[in-house]
Amino acid sequence: MSEVVVITGASAGVGRAVAREFAKRGASIGLLARGVDGLEAAKREVEQRGGRGLVVQTDVANHDEVDAAATRVEETFGPIDIWINNAMASVYSPIRELKPEELRRVTDVTYHGVVWGTMAALRRMLPRDRGVIVQVGSALAYRGIPLQAAYCAAKHAIQGFNDSLYCELLHDRSNVRLTMVNLPALNTPQFDWVLSRLPHRAKPVGTIFQPEVAARAIVWSAFHHRRELNVGWPTTKAVIGNNFFPGYADRYLARTAVEGAQTDEPEDPHRDHNLWKPLPGDHGAHGRFDKDAKRWSLQLMLKTWFGAR
C-alpha cells in the first residue's frame, strides 16, 4: 500500500520537487500551501507520475487551518504516514530596517508553521504509535548570515524545538520518528518572490544545488532512521565549522555574504512579493539559476549509500 504524505509549501520550490519524488512511489499526497495555481499544477504533476494528489489551500501560520487540513487528508486518503514541514517565508533586509510585523510573519510561517504541522501530525500519529515527521531545515539553522536574520532565527528555533521533541519521544518510547534535513543554497523561485530591500536582485549564497537534490534527501530521510541529515558539503561545513570557528565565520561572512547574496541586476523596489499573500501563477520548482546549480551532491550520495546499509 502506498504512503499517505502531507507536504506543506507544496506549490513551488522544494515542496514541489518533494511532491514529484513521492508521486513516483505512488503516494497519496496532501498538498498544502496558500497559492491555488501552484497547488493545482502540483496535483497534475503528482497524478502524471502515478500518485494521488489533494489540494488543501492552507496558511501554515494558522494553527486551525493546519489541523483542518490534516483532518481533510485523513478523511480522503486515510491515516497520515509521513508529514513534511517545508513551508517558509523570508525577508531580505538589514536588521535595522526590518519591521516588527515582517519579523512576526516570517516567524509565524517558517517556525510556527513547523510547530503547528508537527502538532497536527503528533495528534494523529501518537495514538497509532507510528509515523514520520520530516522537518526541512537549513545550514542557516546553525549559522546565521547577514540580510536574512528573520529566516535564520526561525530555522534556529526549529532546531531547538526538535531537540526537545526528540527527547520526549525517546522518553515515551514512541515509535513516531522525527528527522531534520538541513539544506544548502538551492535554485528555487523564492529569490524572486520574497520581500527584499536589497539594491540588487537576491541570489543564493555559496554553492547552489537544484531542488531535486533536496527532494531526494527528504524522501530518503522519510524511510531511514537518521536524526538529522546534512545535504551537501557546504551544509556540513557550515554546521560543523560554526561549532569550532564561529568568530572566523563572522568575519568571513561580513566580508563576503552581503555582496554574495546579490546579483549585478538592480532590484525593482515596487515588485510584488509573497509575504502577506501568494503571488498568482504557477512558479514551479526551479528558480533562475539553472546554469549555476548542481544536479547532484557526492556528499549526499555517499551519506545515503552508507546510511542505508
Image: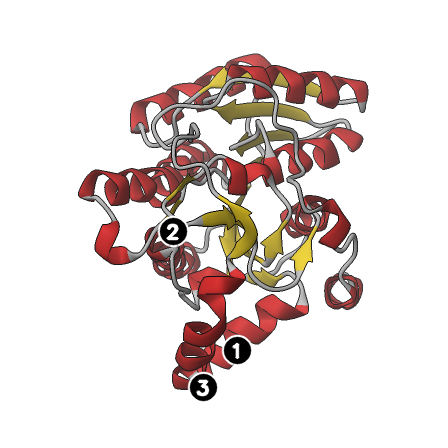
Considering the numbered disc 1 on the image, is that residue within a helix, a strand or a loop?
helix
Residue 94 at what x, y percent from top left?
31, 56
Query: Position of 30 compared to 90: left or right?
Result: right
Q: Residue at position x 64%, y 40% from top?
A: 287
Query: Position of 167 compared to 213: left or right?
Result: left
- Between the residue at mark 3 and the residue at mark 1, the CA separation in whole angstroms equals 9 Å
Tag 1 residue: 240
Which amino acid, by three-letter code, is at mark 2?
A: Tyr
Tell us which disc is closer to us: 3 or 1.
Answer: 3
Tag 2 residue: 151
- Mark 2 and 3 residues: CB-CB less than 8 Å, in contact? no
Q: Is residue 177 visible?
A: no
Tag 3 residue: 245
Which amino acid, by three-letter code, is at mark 3?
A: Phe
Query: Position of 297 compared to 128: left or right?
Result: right
Residue farthest along the left direction in this orientation: 100
Quadrant of res 25: top right
Q: Is residue 44 above or below residue 147?
A: above
- Between the residue at mark 2 and the residue at mark 3, the CA separation in whole angstroms equals 22 Å
Considering the numbered disc 3 on the image, is that residue within a helix, a strand or a loop?
loop
Which amino acid, by three-letter code, is at mark 1?
A: Ile
